[in-house]
Image (tube, helix red, strand yellow):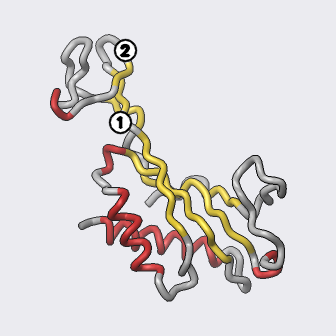
Amino acid sequence: MHEVDMTKCLLLSLQEWKQQHQPEVPLVEVVHLQVGDFTCVEPDSLVFTWGALVSGSWLAGSELRIERTPLRARCLPCGASYAPQQEQAYRSPCCDHPMEEILSGRELRIRSIEYSLPDLQNSPPATQAGSARPTLARDRDPVAGSRL
């Protein structure tokens, strides 16, 4: 179960992110994670492991939301984009060429973090787009380039 190791890496990345806000400790509500279908990571196991590892920590009560990215490839001989299938040995359906170029599906990264700082905790929590209260930039923090 490599999801435990993946979650530990995720927690290390978040610990580094937390240090940017010192001396305050952000109150994390949701961590948005992008997981590609070709990473061999089981999202349900990752969510379960998250709940177990954050219990009793500064991340206790936070939620891990996973956005799955489908496997997409490009056939180099004909240039067609396709969704490789394991049953077809990931070969191109147009010309049966082996998969050589992966366009998506190998992602494993933090997309964003929804959080508040102690001085903002008296106000209602930020919500997704379309709410009555606009989301502040620091309420939903993109973590660009954070790969696990």
Q: Give the quarter of the image for residue 88.
A: top left
Percent of width and height locating residue 10: 46, 68
**Disc 2 + disc 1, Cβ < 8 Å:** no
Percent of width and height locating residue 1: 24, 67
Residue most extreme to the front: 132
Describe residue 65's horizontal placement relative to residue 87 as left or right.
right
The nearer-to-camera label among 2 and 1 is: 1
Amino acid bearing label 2: Gly
Image: 26 above or below 146: below
Please report the residue visible at 73 percent of the width from the left and 83 percent of the height from the top.
24
Amino acid bearing label 1: Leu
Q: Which residue is mark 2?
A: 79
Q: Which residue is mark 1?
A: 71
Q: Give the quarter of the image for residue 14.
A: bottom right
Q: From the image, which quarter does the C terminus lie in?
A: bottom left
Percent of width and height locating residue 84: 28, 29
Please report the residue visible at 83 percent of the width from the left and 54 percent of the height from the top.
132
Image: 18 above or below 38: below
The secondary element bearing badge 1 is classed as loop
